[in-house]
Amino acid sequence: MPVVKIKENETFEQAMKRFKKQCEKAGILTELRRREYYDKPSIRKKKKTAAARKRALKKLKRIGR
């Protein structure tokens, strides 16, 4: 769990920015979106293979340039 202690002479906006960065680094938002609803294992597997295929095609496009 990210914790941010506000330093002396630090604005709220700066502290909020640091907190958001820490949350992003910890992967909290991605985990939250993943757990938002239940996916059956078969659907999870299909999504995983589709994402892998998409990454592979993207990689091939970059190499083809």
Image: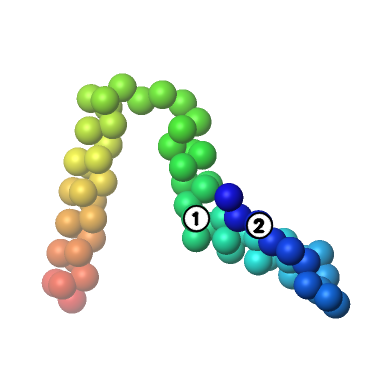
| Left/right of residue 56 with respect to residue 24 in the rendered view | left
Dot 1 surroundings within 10 Å: few (below 14), some, or many (20 or more)?
few
Dot 2 surroundings within 10 Å: few (below 14), some, or many (20 or more)?
few
For the residue labelled by badge 1, is the local secondary structure a helix, a strand or a loop?
helix
Residue at mark 1 to residue at mark 2: CA–CA distance: 11 Å
In this orientation, which residue lies closer to the viewer: 2 or 23?
A: 2
> Mark 1 or mark 2, which is nearer to you?
2
* Residue at left offset 69%, top offset 61%: 4
Q: Are marks 1 and 2 in contact (CB under 8 Å)?
A: no
- Tell me the amino acid under the disc marked 1: Ala
Place residue 61 in its image quadrant: bottom left
| Left/right of residue 29 with respect to residue 12 in the rendered view | left
| Left/right of residue 37 with respect to residue 45 in the rendered view | right
In this orientation, which residue lies closer to the viewer: 7 or 29?
A: 7
Q: Is residue 45 above or below residue 8?
A: above
* Residue at left offset 26%, top offset 25%: 41
In this orientation, which residue lies closer to the viewer: 11 or 59?
A: 11
Q: Which residue is mark 2?
A: 3
Task: Tally the numbered discs.
Answer: 2
Where is residue 8 shown, x and y percent of the image? 83, 75
Q: Earlier in the sequence, mark 1 or mark 2?
A: 2
- Tell me the amino acid under the disc marked 2: Val
Where is residue 49 shown, x and y percent of the image? 19, 41
Task: Give the numbered dot on residue 54.
Answer: none
Q: Is residue 59 above or below residue 63?
A: above
| Left/right of residue 31 with respect to residue 64 in the rendered view | right
* Residue at left offset 60%, top offset 55%: 2
Q: Which residue is mark 1?
A: 26
* Residue at left offset 18%, top offset 76%: 65
